[in-house]
Image: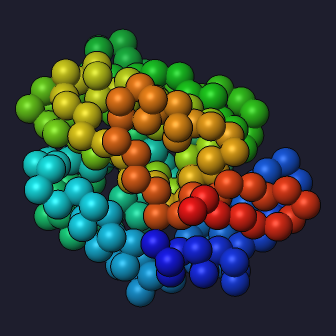
Amino acid sequence: MRRMEERILRDGKVLPGGILKVGSFLNQQIDTDFLRAMGQEIARLYAGSGVTKILTIEASGIAIAAAAALELGVPMLFAKKHKTSNVDGSVYSTVVHSFTHGTDYTVVVSRDYLLPSDRVLLVDDFLANGAALRGLAELTRQAGAELVGAAIAIEKAFQGGGDALRADGVRVESLAVIESLEDGAITFRR
Ligand code: 5GP
């Protein structure tokens, strides 16, 4: 998506450790006109795929997931990072390693909201090593739902998570794919 690449070049800030900050339009302040365009692009990519639910992780995936869900006319569901007690077995849960924080966290989603009949599209803001998406795919698997694919705003290809998922047969569509952030220069995959 040309507009995403242009926006990253204009407003993205490259931090040490291969981190890209996009707080001015996606991660903290949100450009709502651009958000709508992202939702439309994801809906275009997955039109006719029979998606019944969009699944993301709180918090930074929620806005783009909601924008895509609006366009596809389906519910948006987010996995919670809180340690919700599962003594009554009411949630699906798995552990995700956070690339940005270097820690592990548990993500949970209520069994009431993710159904065996669902065809699930995973949506997130960033795809780096792929841990977040694999966690969401695992929740989908636990529910017995079908994984249709994933849509990501910004994929950092140099961390390999997206290509590993594609090699595993998962459809992964990214609105911008960054090949390198070396020396502060942003290079896109062509
Ligand atoms: P992964 O699990 O694929 O390694 O990392 C994806 C998650 O880490 C995303 O949900 C996102 O919140 C966060 N993340 C990874 N890389 C970046 C980055 O360069 N910038 C920002 N803002 N978040 C990132």
Left or right, 50 with respect to 180, comes to left
Q: Position of residue 99 (x, y in %)?
A: 69, 38
The quadrant in which residue 89 appears is top left
The mark tally for this picture is 0
Above/below status of 120 relative to 126: above
Residue at 91% x, 61% y is 183
Identity of the residue furthest to the front in this view: 190
Horizontally, residue 129 falls left or right of residue 187, namely left
- Residue 76 in the image, given as x and y percentages of width and height: 27, 54
User: Which one is in front, 145 or 162?
Assistant: 162
For the point 85% across and 56% down, which residue is it?
Answer: 182
Would residue 137 appear left or right of 118 to someone viewing this image?
A: right
Q: Is residue 188 left or right of residue 165?
A: right
Q: Residue at x 78, y 70 (%)?
A: 13
Seen in the picture, residue 12 relative to 173 is either above or below; the reply is: below
Using the image, determine if residue 19 lies above or below residue 39.
above
Q: Quadrant of the C terminus?
A: bottom right
Relative to 145, residue 174 above or below: below
Percent of width and height locating residue 37? 37, 79
Colouring used for the render: rainbow
Q: Residue at x 71, y 73 (%)?
A: 12
Looking at the image, can residue 108 be seen? no
Q: Position of residue 108 (x, y in %)?
A: 40, 30
**Quick check: can you spot residue 133?**
yes
Q: Give the residue furthest to the bottom.
A: 33
